[in-house]
Image: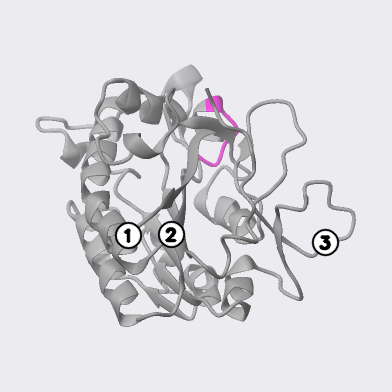
Amino acid sequence: MLDTRLPDMHRIVGSHDVVMITLDALRFDAAQRCFERGELPVLAPHLPADGWELRHTPGSFTYAAHSAFFAGFLPTPARPGPHPRLFALEFEGSETIVPETFVFSGRADIVGGFRDQGYRSICIGGVGFFNRRNALGSQLPGLFEESHWQPELGVTAVDSTERQVALACERLQAAGEQRCFLFINVSAIHQPNRHYLPGCDADGLDSHCAALRYVDGELAALFAALRARGPAFVIICSDHGTAYGEDGFYGHRLAHETVMNVPYAHFVLSP
């Protein structure tokens, strides 16, 4: 049974590392299929007994979704609301701020809000919107005190998640005792993902799932590093899904259910 209670974020912010992991382009149905088949040994212990929570993304592609995330609008539960938020920015008339919500004052993004609370903000980039190769690719990572991207972390690198996790662990260690707001945009599930399924010559739902299985295994080292630092509050979700021919649709930046339905979870890692 899904626990719909909102944790008191005033008890989290300041005492826990806060980690946001976006599994770029991961579909809900693929994530749930992997869970039900027992293929997510690292993530499954942190999910509800019935698997991922189904949510609706606020954006159908990476830039739009992350712009909303960094303003405090995470994917919305796919059930009747209202739906209180974990984090929020000061905004007159908001109906989703409750006593448990942590509200950042005087900021236009939660990244700066965490810095105001003494956190070091770290971005480990993945897809092109985090590559800092041009003005557009610099906007989102530019919110952070430190941001990292190289081709080895991008969508065409077979070992991208391993490298992203290794870099994240390195940067967490460098932060010492300072609490961190760590963001990782996991690129592996985004197309192309056929290289995670031997003999596959075209991306599809099976290779999409194979990519998630790869990512799951690599997250073990990150979770161990976070536990070693003390408690961490982890948000892990997709920014959008992707279509593989359903109803004639392919890709994303469109409002098909394969794009708008995303998996979501949050949990605490304790030492």
Q: Quadrant of residue 40?
A: top left
CA gap between label 1 and label 3 equals 34 Å
Quadrant position of the C terminus in the picture: bottom left
Task: Residue at 33% x, 21% y: name it.
Answer: 36
Residue 8: horizontal and vertical position, in percent?
64, 52
Q: Nearer the viewer, residue 17 or 123?
A: 17
- Which residue in the protein does label 3 denote? 91
Label 1 Cα crowd, 10 Å radius (few <14 / some 14-19 / many 20+): some
Amino acid type, label 2 = Ala
- Which residue in the protein does label 2 denote? 232
Label placed on residue 227: 1
Q: Range of the magenta residues?
A: 252-257
Q: Are marks 2 and 1 in contact (CB under 8 Å)?
A: yes
Q: Earlier in the sequence, mark 1 or mark 3?
A: 3
Label placed on residue 122: none
Element class at badge 2: strand
Q: Work out whether residue 221 can be spotted.
A: yes
Please, is residue 267 above or below residue 204 in the view?
Answer: below
